[in-house]
Amino acid sequence: MGIEANNIIEVLKTIVHPSAGKDIYSLGLVENLVVKENSVSFSLKFSTVNDPLKSSLKRACEIAIREKFGNDVNIDINIITAIKPVTPKKEQAEILPGVKNIVAIASGKGGVGKSTVATNLAIAFGNAGAKVGLIDADIFGPSIPKMFGVEYEKPTVQKISGKDMLIPVESYGVKILSIGFFIDPEDATVWRGPMASNALKQMLGDTDWGELDYLFVDLPPGTSDIHLTLVQTVPVTGSVIISTPQDVALADAIKGIKMFRTENIDVPVLGLIENMSWFTPEELPDNKYFIFGKGGCAELSKKLSIPLIGQIPIVQSIREGGDDGTPSVTRKDKVSETFKNIAEALRIEILKRNTQQAPTKKVEIKRKSFSDFK
């Protein structure tokens, strides 16, 4: 009478796995058991290729079977490794899925009116019928809330798909978010780089921006962690560089342009906007006094083959509008028309960029060694 499978199973149940404290059959380590007359074959399944118990358990099975059924039994035990199914990593939820264009507003130098320009451009785009958002990413000097007259308002939080999301403040038809909403207006933001970068990531990824045609990002002056965080977190459609015509500002503007144009970053520079191009007294609207020099951005535009989108004069009402929360573009005067014309010129540049170039991808910057900077 031949050996039956049940007899072999009973023998295998006597072999205890030292680590698990249970028999190998109950643990499911025995697979593909085949018993034919005087032959026994099965597999022992282990979770890792280098399991130290493979040989000893195989040997224990052979000894136990021979002790029970004699040395004439043909035994074939295969060692196999359990291949765990690889669970695909859940794709990170796309950041800003409803935003068509992300435009960085940058400057090489501080004090050139970058936030003033960003504020007026955002409102001008909104007034022209676009859905617009504006992020104040100037973490250490947030001024957008004051320029919109909402410095004492607070974004609300709403649970969306099980996640707490910030709801931007709205003013003049523009959705706004700034670190200025979360700190006292008179407090200094003393943060290390990673803290500032995380704040920007939250404003991008943990905020319900909804459907937007344009999201403007008002960046800090210079080139910093914030700039890298932006281009690594979302695909930036293009950048706009703000400068005054003076040589000091232009020298820093060139650095900002080169940063966006580096091979690793490769974000299109949509154009230059020259601020404080000349001074025009209110009582002499046709006079121009070139306090900071003349034609600086026009020359840089030709040199670097970047469109000069527009020029903005020094006018007292621009400063007053920024201080009292009534931006110049909301008024009906010559300065308002200037901002509207610049906004239209920028809209055209964005359209040209989108029709002539492939969509920008998020930047992946690999760690460099010192030799890479030589």
Image (cartoon, rainbow, N blue to C red):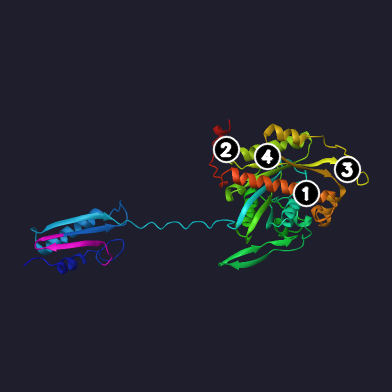
Q: Earlier in the sequence, mark 1 or mark 3?
A: 3
Q: Which residues are magenta?
A: 26-40
Residue of label 2? 263
Q: Which mark is residue 204?
A: none
* Residue at figure coordinates x 68%, y 46% from the top left: 348
Q: Which mark is residue 339?
A: 1
For the view shown, which residue lies furthest in the right direction?
Answer: 283
Mark 3 to mark 4 CA distance (whole Å): 29 Å
Residue plotted at (64% across, 51% down): 102
Q: Secondary structure at mark 1?
A: helix
Q: Which three-letter amino acid code belongs to the residue tagged 1?
A: Phe
Q: Which of these two is toward me, 1 or 230?
A: 230
> Disc 2, disc 3: CB below 8 Å?
no
Badge 3 is on which residue?
280
Q: CA distance from mark 2 to mark 3?
A: 41 Å
Residue 272 at x, y = what percent? 72, 41
